[in-house]
Image (cartoon, rainbow, N blue to C red):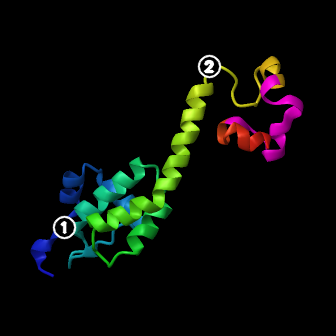
Amino acid sequence: MHMDDLIPIGQLAERTGLSVSAIRFYETKGLVSPMRNSGGQRRFLRSDIRRLSFVLIAQQLGLPLRDILKVLEGLPQGRTPTQSDWTRISMTVREELDDRIAKLTRMRNNLDGCIGCGCLSLKKCSLYNPHDKASVKGSGPQYLLRERDAVTD
């Protein structure tokens, strides 16, 4: 590895748009692993720019840091996900994203009415949830958490 391949934390912050403290936070979570120069200062691989950009994208998709770390641990040290890595990764999270989209859609569609049986309208619930059928699936707004048919089965 050549010294030109290493950059200080300030330059990494500038290139990623992250604060230095955010980069240190990601370091404590194991998402990046800087080296130290003879003076003890952090030095990062240039590839960490893309690696942290990947972390930011994955977080925007709603992936928790522990899942992002698992993905990155599956890559050789210091390597950034490639297009084929990202395709594989996205396929594994697609189902979770689809479930989130479905929940958000149900919430949006029920926003003006009831809150999914939690319950604000006894009149509506006698139609949607007679005899509190939703309670067998657990507490809380079950109609928003699951498809209505799955709750009333």
Q: Is residue 6 visible?
A: yes
Residue 133 pos. (x, y %): 84, 37
Give whichever of 110, 26 is nearer the camera: 110
Give whichever of 90, 28 is nearer the camera: 90
Q: Secondary structure at mark 2?
A: loop
Q: Residue at x 29, y 55 (%)?
A: 20
Q: Which stretch is magenta?
A: 127-143
Earlier in the chain: of badge 1 and badge 2, it is: 1
Residue 138 pos. (x, y %): 79, 45
Residue of label 2 = 112
Q: Amino acid at mark 1?
A: Arg
What separation in Å lies between label 1 and label 2 (alpha carbons)? 50 Å
Q: Is residue 29 visible?
A: no
Whether residue 15 sits left or right of residue 101 in the image: it is left
Magenta segment, principal secondary structure? helix
- Which numbered dot is residue 46? 1
Position above or below: 21 against 42: above
Q: Secondary structure at mark 1?
A: loop
Position above or below: 153 against 48: above
Residue 81 pos. (x, y %): 30, 67
Question: Quarter holding the N terminus?
Answer: bottom left
Q: Residue at x 30, y 50 (%)?
A: 19
Whether residue 33 sits left or right of residue 123 in the image: it is left
Q: Residue at x 33, y 68 (%)?
A: 85
Question: Quarter holding the C terminus?
Answer: top right
Whether residue 26 sits left or right of residue 80 in the image: it is right
Give whichever of 74, 23 is nearer the camera: 74
Q: Amino acid at mark 2?
A: Asp
